[in-house]
Image (spheres, coloured by chain):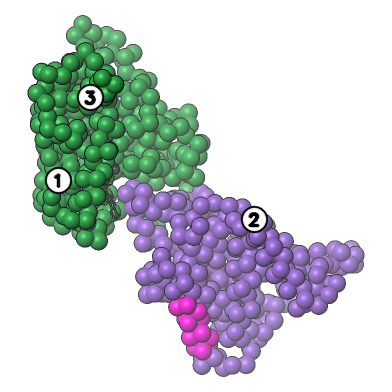
Chain colours: A purple, B green
Amino acid sequence: MDIIAQLFAGLSLGSVLLLAALGLSLTFGQMGVINMAHGEFMMAGAYTAFVVQGVVGDAGVSLLLALPLGFVVGGLLGLLLEATLIHRMYRRPLDTLLVTWGVALVLQQVARDVFGAPNVDVRAPAWLSGAVEIGGLALPRTRLFILALAAVCVVALALALRATPLGRRIRAVVQNRDLAEASGISSRATDRVTFFIGSGLAGIAGVALTLLGSIGPTLGTNYIVDAFLVVVAGGIGQIKGTVIAATALGLMQAFLEYSTTASVAKVLVFVAIVAFLQLRPQGLVSVRTRSLA
Amino acid sequence: MTDTPSTGQRAELARPHAAPEKRGTPDDRPGTPAAGPAPRATPPGLAGADALLGTDTTRFRHDYLEVRGLRVEFDGFVAVRDVDLTVTQGDLRFLIGPNGAGKTTLIDAVTGLVRATGSAAFGGSELLGRTTHRIARAGVGRTFQTASVFEELTVLQNLDIAAGARRRPLTLLRRRTTTPPAVEQALETVGLTAQRDLPAGVLAHGQKQWLEIGMLLVQDAHLLLLDEPVAGMTQAEREETGQLLRRIGSQRVVVVVEHDMEFLRSFADSVTVMHQGRVLAEGTVAEVQNDPAVVEVYLGTPAEPAGDVPAGTVPAGTVPADAAPADAAPADAATREGEPR
Ligand SMILES: Nc1ncnc2c1ncn2[C@@H]1O[C@H](COP(=O)(O)OP(=O)(O)OP(=O)(O)O)[C@@H](O)[C@H]1O
Ligand SMILES: [Mg+2]
């Protein structure tokens, strides 16, 4: 029974990690951009949910509205960042890291100025309150919702990349930029679209996080390192790897937390990832990308 | 004594009679009736070429590539200088020259991958200064020296990308269920119908090169710049590719960079020779082979009178660049450091 409870806790944590990392698997994994402001795009998504609820009132309607709106808000922020700063430093990862970290701090300050430093709450809709009882085990509906949301996002992204002409273009530009250009594809436009989608997914993750607790300006900083770890451990540029790594890390964290404390568990997970990357630097699933490796 | 064969090889380019003899391909040899067995002689993979190529013949009748005073510099090293080049439709042009002559750089410049000064116009509109994908959309297609396809996409997806480059953004999310006729046609033309759903990365080298050409066809390129399209191919594959290039060349402007002399003699209508970034000579295969400056570049010594070469010892199909690198490389280095020599 305990094992099953931990299993669910792990999967739930994994789905949160996955939502946070999925966008990074595009912007970092596919494009090789180290965007430290990715967490702040999540924060922006969370505040989008807060604002929408303030305007709409009804918790259920506002959640369903906030998901697409959070995507657009995150995406537009990403687009702006890409067009103004990141595209100038595609070949300079260190500069990108520093600059986007600066942007992250600025965004946190903006959130503080606009919404105030204290955390705020977003009400969960009634149909997500309580838990589903399965065999004497109480599974919180919000957690189940996030699991389902993560699954939907993964499937949608995988389908978009695999089955649409747009996805084909994104993959083409990642695989061979010069050939893509010579085939008539604007690699700049494709970069922007890719960045929009990746950042938009961060916005969706932020909306989801409002279901788990109160939100504040530093919400993103809690997730950014874990999200990068997931992408690196999963193997750069592979959605499949990101899914496996997020699930594995979530489970590991949950089981270790059960036998020790949360912070010891975190350290152990971190050590495990470092050890794993020593053995397999390319991550779980490996593929060539253009600016890393 | 021991170096007699090598001397023979090196002098091969100067053989005056080599070109005319070798020009014919099996199916236009005298005695082969054009109508009868011709479809048989054509490799099955090429069957669809005419249908595919026949679409736009009238619209692009008068296309030509015109390059004037082209110059490319890399950090002070001039890789291409003062290049003038005019190539018209129906004139299958070969571009040759020792390693480092600037052939690839010339193609890169025309397709916007490296910055260049001067002028390069196709169909009357200037290409220099435009981005690569705009140049591609203007009907200029190229292949890369290292056979380049999207390795993780299927053959069909590779062709789809080339075919859809001009699609409007809003249609990009729509999943298409049927294959456009031009793509089907191209699959057949380059003989990859059976491999359509394989990842392009698993294709044989020669098949990748055909896929590249197929992509240019569906891309509807009317200027094709091919960087060593038959490198690494078997003799039979070269023959097929050469015939395909001929068909394409009759309706589009085609420039082929190639080191293989036998391939050149079989299929070139005209030849431009580059050396150290400049155009050294231009003309028919025979003219170029007899040009003393060309012979000197390839041999590193002044040309001997052609008659002195013992023709019997000359093996056909020598690659002159292979005979030259020892001479060409230092010359290259000297230009890099000290400029004019
Ligand atoms: N990006 C670059 N930066 C600096 N120098 C370059 C660059 N690209 C090419 N070069 C130099 O320019 C010269 C011409 O190179 P290019 O590749 O055009 O030769 P090529 O005629 O295609 O030779 P090959 O037959 O070996 O393919 C060479 O000396 C090469 O080293
Ligand atoms: Mg070259």
Nearer to me, B133 or A201: B133
Q: Residue visible at 56% across and 71% down?
A: A202
Percent x, y for residue B137?
27, 50
Query: What residue sits right under mark 3 in the picture?
Result: B7
State yes or no: Cβ of the residue under disc 3 lies below 8 Å from any atom of ligand 1.
no
Judged from the image, the secondary structure of the residue bearing numbered disc 2 is loop
Task: Identify the chain of the residue marked 2, using the numbered disc in the image.
Answer: A
| Rendered view: A138 above or below B314 | below
Query: Considering the numbered disc 3 on the image, is that residue within a helix, a strand or a loop?
Result: helix
Residue type at tag 2: Arg
Label 1 vs label 3: CA separation? 26 Å
- The answer to whether residue B247 of the structure is visible from this angle is no
The residue sitting at 41% across, 65% down in the picture is A91
**Residue holding disc 2:** A280
Magenta residues, start to end: A98-111
Residues under labels 2 and 3: Cα distance?
Answer: 53 Å
Q: Which chain carries label 3?
A: B
Is label 1 in contact with label 3 (beta carbons under 8 Å)?
no
Image x and y of residue A192, in percent: 41, 65
Three-letter code, disc 1 = Arg
